[in-house]
Amino acid sequence: MSNKCKYKVGFSWPTEKGDREVVGMAEDGRCLVSRPGKVPGPFFNELLESEDIDFEIKWGQQEIKKAAAKKKAVKEEHALKITKEDTRGFADSFTPLRRAKVIAALNRKMFFDGVIMKRKEYIHKAIEDGAQVYGSGAKRRLEKPSGAFLAQQQLTKTGIDYAEYLIRKDD
């Protein structure tokens, strides 16, 4: 280890607990470094070798990268949750239990038009293509302008109710 501090006074770097700064040099050549989160002053400084500062900087950069990756993952998970739970206002007034059941039913993946997709994706696509809900009671169906339709037994009562809600909402 060298006894001479290779960092100039004023050099600073981020750490997990806050920024640190070289505030002076000791008589023996070590760096006088401020402690993070403390009020500046001689009683809150510590003596470090240049190698210790190098290690702290390297470790701090790794921690900052880990924190950024974790923050990104949490943000992506939150965005996914929002997308999954989006019912365009349909289930907003439901109880939490009923809302969870509606979300589960609408996010159920099924085979529609030769493609595997969520019920709500199919309903959105069908309504964008001009589909309407016809019939009453258990005999309701979501019918496209081409005449192709899915009955309530295939789309579920929740799916038909959701389609009706979206159609009324668009009007």
Image: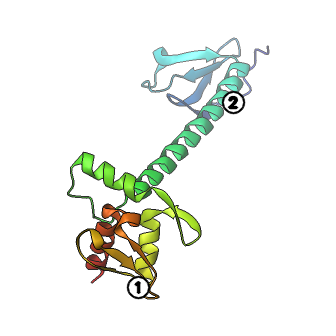
**Residue 24 point in image, percent of width and height:** 60, 24
Instruction: Pick the quarter of the image with the N terminus.
Output: top right
Residue 106 shown left or right of residue 44 in the figure? left
Along the viewing direction, whichever of 30 and 69 lies nearer the viewer: 69
Find residue 94 and report its image quarter: bottom left
Looking at this rendering, what residue extends furthest in the right direction? 1
Tell me if label 1 and label 2 are in contact, CB under 8 Å. Answer: no
Height in image: 126 above or below 17? below
Picture residue at 51% right of the left edge, 50% below the top: 76
Instruction: Pick the quarter of the image with the C terminus.
Output: bottom left
Along the viewing direction, whichever of 78 and 137 lies nearer the viewer: 137
Picture residue at 32% right of the left edge, 69% below the top: 160
Q: Secondary structure at mark 1?
A: loop
Query: Does residue 33 show up?
Result: yes
Residue for badge 2: 58
Picture residue at 36% right of the left edge, 54% below the top: 103
Picture residue at 41% right of the left edge, 71% below the top: 123
**Residue 125 point in image, percent of width and height:** 46, 75
Q: Secondary structure at mark 2?
A: helix
- Looking at numbered disc 1 in the image, what kind of residue is underneath it? Gly
Residue for badge 1: 130
Q: Residues within 10 Å of mark 2 (few under 14, many from 20)?
A: few
**Residue 59 point in image, percent of width and height:** 65, 27
**Residue 124 point in image, percent of width and height:** 42, 72
Q: Residues within 10 Å of mark 1 (few under 14, many from 20)?
A: few
- Looking at numbered disc 2 in the image, what kind of residue is underneath it? Lys
